[in-house]
Amino acid sequence: MTDDESNSPASGSTLRHSSCVIEVSAALIFRRGRLLMLAMRLNGLPLAGRCSFLAGDGSFAFKTAFDEQHAQSSPGILMELENIRRVHDMPAVRWMVRGARLADTPLIQASIDPCYSCTDR
């Protein structure tokens, strides 16, 4: 197998490498107190998860995922609502989507977060 073949997406090597990079990065960010990870479970099984990075006075969404078998219950939206609630309880975080236009912002955040665009937090 050539180097090109061993790193092709079909080989799974690229995916394993990406997962490793994310895992190591998340561990370092966690140690610095800059990782916000949330999980929702039902009977011990994962329904939804969300990962954000905290930097300066802002919060950056990285990834939200949910079990599609429960899509009718909107676990991803419920996870976002919990994230908004928790970020509002963090005085050091003053913004989540600085500089974004409404069209760039998820509807759920624009419709529920009263401080979505305010600077008076």
Image (tube, grey):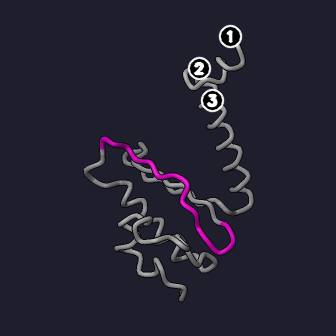
Of all residues shown, which one is farthest toward the top? 1
- CA gap, disc 1 and disc 2: 10 Å
Name above or below for residue 5 compared with residue 48. above
- The spot of residue 103 in percent (x, y) is 40, 67
Q: What residue span does the magenta drawing correspond to?
A: 55-69
Q: Is residue 50 left or right of residue 57?
A: left
Residue 91 magenta-highlighted: no
Image quarter of the N terminus: top right
Q: Quadrant of residue 46?
A: top left
Residue 61 magenta-highlighted: yes
Name above or below for residue 118 compared with residue 2. below
Q: Label 2: state its secondary structure.
A: helix
Question: Do the residues under discs 2 and 3 have CB atoms within 8 angstroms?
Answer: yes
Considering only order in the chain, which callout, 2 or 1, is on the residue closer to the N terminus?
A: 1
Considering only order in the chain, which callout, 1 or 3, is on the residue closer to the N terminus?
A: 1
Asked whether 91 or 5 is in front, the reply is: 5
Classified by dominant secondary structure, the portion drawn in magenta counts as strand
User: Please, what is the three-letter code of the amino acid marked with disc 2?
Assistant: Ser
- The spot of residue 27 in percent (x, y) is 70, 49
- The spot of residue 118 in percent (x, y) is 49, 84
